[in-house]
Image (cartoon, rainbow, N blue to C red):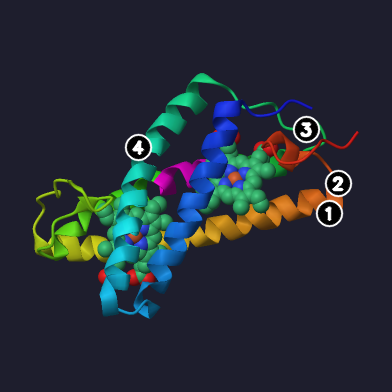
Amino acid sequence: MTRYSRVAIILHWLMALMIIGNLAGGFLHDYVPREGGQRAFVMGLHVSFGLTIIALTLVRLGWRLANAPPPLPAYFTSGERLLAKAAHWAFYVAMLALPLSGWLMAERNERPLLYFFAVAVPKAGIGKPLAETFNEVHEILGWTMLALLAVHIIGIIKHLVMDRDNLLPRMGWGTPRA
Ligand code: HEM
Ligand code: HEM
């Protein structure tokens, strides 16, 4: 069994953690109390991890294009190959478009956009009405990312339980089965 490269594995799990955290922070932010600046803190982390994800996605895409992933196991049907490919590339598109739409909507309010509460990040300068539209886009892309994640995890569970193959070890998790 060949694994993904170490760089691909580190980027995969680091970014999965950040994206799942951001999905949680985004969808649950209405439930975080405003008192004591709790919501501002959660959203401050949300935008900072989100901006980091833009940069990491560019690095990851560059790495992915320069380093082919290990070939899929031979028993994969052509349908499975197509599905895996489509889901993975849809993820790459969402990993760029979702945080970019977040950045584009930052002009909805007058507060400065701060990277980890410290460094001011320029806003897009597209005006409030368009920024409002990107708020809608951000929400739709958030649901899209959640749906992709569900398909991804269902696929992995299917391979783990039904095919009993080495998909997780390929991504650096656990020891491969013989
Ligand atoms: C939002 C979070 C996640 C994103 C954006 C994501 C994205 C991706 C992408 C783009 C690939 C394909 C890599 C490539 O060929 O370039 C991949 C592969 C993989 N992911 Fe995730 N992933 C996420 C969460 C997870 C979770 C939670 C698990 C474990 C339950 C997981 C397990 C895997 C495995 C095992 C592979 C390798 C599949 C193969 O061998 O082809 N991922 N992921
Ligand atoms: C991959 C990274 C990101 C993910 C997964 C993500 C996800 C989400 C989700 C699911 C929501 C809730 C949408 C709703 O139900 O209305 C949300 C809201 C929000 N996001 Fe993101 N986001 C990301 C990046 C960003 C970035 C980079 C920014 C800004 C620079 C940002 C700013 C916001 C703001 C301000 C809200 C609150 C919107 C409101 O007031 O309703 N997000 N995000």
Mark number displayed over residue 73: 3
**Type of amino acid under label 3:** Pro
Give the image location of residue 74, x and y in percent: 80, 30
* Residue closer to the observer: 39 or 100: 39
Closer mark to the observer between disc 3 and disc 2: 2
**Type of amino acid under label 4:** Ala
Q: Residue at x 50, y 57 (%)?
A: 20
First to last magenta residue range: 86-95
Q: Is residue 137 visible?
A: no
Q: Earlier in the sequence, mark 2 or mark 4?
A: 4
| Image quarter for ligand 2 | bottom left
The CA distance from mark 3 to mark 2 is: 12 Å
In the picture of the structure, the residue carrying the numbered disc 1 is 161
Looking at the image, do the residues carrying marks 1 and 2 touch, with CB atoms under 8 Å apart?
yes
Q: Earlier in the sequence, mark 3 or mark 1?
A: 3
Q: Earlier in the sequence, mark 3 or mark 2?
A: 3
The CA distance from mark 1 to mark 2 is: 5 Å
**Type of amino acid under label 2:** Arg
Looking at the image, do the residues carrying marks 4 and 3 touch, with CB atoms under 8 Å apart?
no
Closer mark to the observer between disc 3 and disc 1: 1
In the picture of the structure, the residue carrying the numbered disc 4 is 55
Q: Residues within 10 Å of mark 2 (few under 14, many from 20)?
A: few
Q: Main secondary structure of the magenta part?
A: helix
In the picture of the structure, the residue carrying the numbered disc 2 is 164
Q: Residues within 10 Å of mark 3 (few under 14, many from 20)?
A: few
Q: State which quarter of the image contains the N terminus.
A: top right
**Type of amino acid under label 1:** Val
Label 4 secondary element: helix
